[in-house]
Amino acid sequence: MLIQKFNKSKAKEIIATACQVLSRGGLVVYPTETCYGLGADATNPEAIARLLSYKRRREGKPLSILVKDKNMAEDYVYLNDSAKNLYNNFLPGPMTVISKSKNKVAPNVASELGTLGIRISSHPIPMALVSQFGKPITATSANASWQKKPYTIADILKPLSAKQKEKLDFIIDGGALPKQPASTVVDTTLLDSMVLRAGAIKLQKVSQIFTSHSETETMQLAQTLLLSYWNQIRKWGLLIALLGDLGSGKTIFTKGVGQFLQIRDHITSPSYTLVNEYPFSRHKVSGMLYHLDPWRLENFADFSKLEVVKMLAPNQIVVVEWASKFLPQLQKMAENQNSSFLVVSFADKGKTTRQLTIAK
């Protein structure tokens, strides 16, 4: 592992060394406008395997890539009008824009849904690096998984084992970085853009509204949400409250949750059973999906007898249809259990069109 203090007089030499490391499949730590990033050749499967081994966590979580400009981005993803608007107004800058991948990166870079996050940094070092390298590099944070965001080199190295340190080939030390928020992440693959993570650039209000024209789009939305919440599910569990009339798409949405969790059992409405349980195993993570429908219950005390509190735990997802009956109590229950809480409202807009409002 080589650590090089960055100074402008040696900038060309430092960037050239970093590019040589990347071309050999090595890992390079570099400063950005948010925190320290970890770069690997995004088209090299061996380099990506090395990066994932360093991070020590995969579980289906995709990697974003760093490119030099919009033209380079279009070599790797399909840009719709929503994405182009974000590129024109917010990039370069602390934003990750998710688009449909053209499958030109190494396996395990794009998400399992076929989407890929693109970063165009406003920091001169990563921009010089990717410009000279000529290919996209990964834009993940340089900390090992479950560690704090790294704003200094010490933040990166202190928690690492000797074996992990050996995987870092070259570190560009840009000094202590300002403690800026992470990049804002926007998914443009849906009909309406979805902010998956609010960061340095603020784009959303409390709620987001989406239009689905088919059951497939409703299930895709559910999968996108679960992918963005996967870390929270692993740590605390997730309660999703579904609001809407009969036939508005609540069970279809839950089927999308099941698809994301790779559940093979047929997911059906729990209207008469009150609770349906579906074990899942996704990327070696085992857990449970609980699908509830309290429409026949008169009060929250009866609902509580289903032992919902025990369902709110790490690696477990609780989806409640007709949740409007007990919405304040459900939110309080999730807060008491430290579980994440999400409200999805469905409105029928005619034939197969549905309007979904998501409140976090």
Image (tube, grey):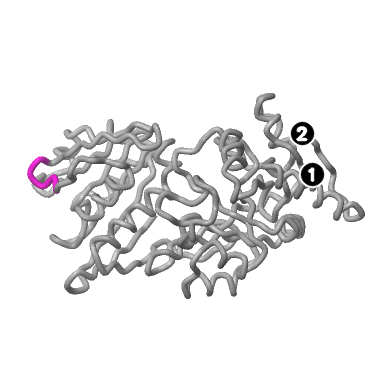
Instruction: Name the amino acid type tagged 2.
Output: Met
Q: Which residue is mark 2?
A: 1
Q: Is residue 240 above or below residue 278?
A: below
Q: Which-is-in-front pick, marks 2 and 1? A: 2
Q: x, y (%) of residue 1?
A: 77, 33
Who's the residue at 53% across and 74% down the image? 85
Q: x, y (%) of residue 304?
A: 20, 36
Q: Quadrant of residue 337?
A: top left
SS at badge 2: loop
Q: Quadrant of the C terminus?
A: bottom left
Question: For the magenta stretch, what is the residue range?
Answer: 269-273
Who's the residue at 39% across and 65% down the image? 190
Residue toward you, 141 or 232 = 141
Q: Is residue 4 left or right of residue 356?
A: right
Who's the residue at 20% across and 40% down the image? 265
Q: Which residue is mark 1?
A: 173
Q: Is residue 208 left or right of residue 38?
A: left
Q: Residues within 10 Å of mark 2 (few under 14, many from 20)?
A: few
Taking the magenta stretch, the answer to whether it contains residue 272 is yes
